Image (tube, rainbow, N blue to C red):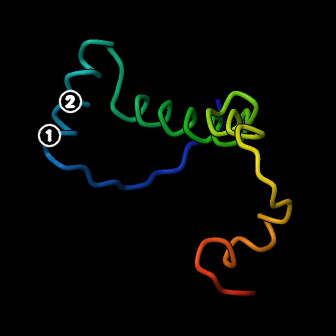
Amino acid sequence: MPTLKRTQMYFPEEILRELKRKASEEKTTIADIVRGAVSDLLKKGKTKNWVEDPLWNMVGASDSKDKDLSVNHDKYLYGKNK
């Protein structure tokens, strides 16, 4: 296990109550739960799979006679040139 450094965190009472309940159920500590949640969050951010992102499905979903929309979007949306 890596060397642990002490830090201080503040939680709303309701969240702290839930953390205590969960720690008791899982026979672990609040610190272990928080470390695990933060670790998962950081890993998730590093391994974003853009192909599985629902926004990726929008690529090519529309068609237009105007082929310069990404460059001149203000012109088409607001009637303004760059």
Q: Is residue 53 left or right of residue 29?
A: right
Residue that appears at 81% across and 61% down? 66
Which of the two residues, 15 or 4, is positioned nearer the viewer here? 15
Does 20 sit left or right of 69 as displayed? left
Q: Amino acid at mark 2?
A: Glu
- Label 1–label 2 contact, CB within 8 A: yes
Instruction: Give how far apart the Cα atoms at labels 1 and 2 are.
Output: 6 Å
Quadrant of the drawing holding the N terminus: top right
- Going 34% across and 54% down the picture, which residue do you hit? 9
Farthest residue in the right direction? 67
Q: Where on the picture, by quarter, is residue 21?
A: top left
Q: Disc 2 designates what residue?
A: 18
Label 1: which secondary element: helix
In depth, the one of 22 and 6 nearer the eye is 22
Question: Mark on residue 77?
Answer: none
Residue nearest the viewer, comparing 9 with 41: 41
Farthest residue to the front: give it: 65
Q: Position of residue 49 (x, y in %)?
A: 73, 32
Q: Nearer the viewer, residue 25 or 52?
A: 52
Residue bearing mark 1: 14
Which quadrant holds the C terminus? Answer: bottom right
Query: Taking 45 as reference, is 66 left or right?
Result: right
SS at mark 2 in the image: helix
* Quarter holding residue 8: bottom left
* Three-letter code, disc 1: Glu
Q: Residues within 10 Å of mark 2 (few under 14, many from 20)?
A: few
Which percent across, then down, holds residue 38? 51, 40
Circle 1: is it few (<14), some (14-19), or many (20+) Cα within 10 Å?
few
Percent coordinates x, y for residue 31 in the rendering: 39, 35
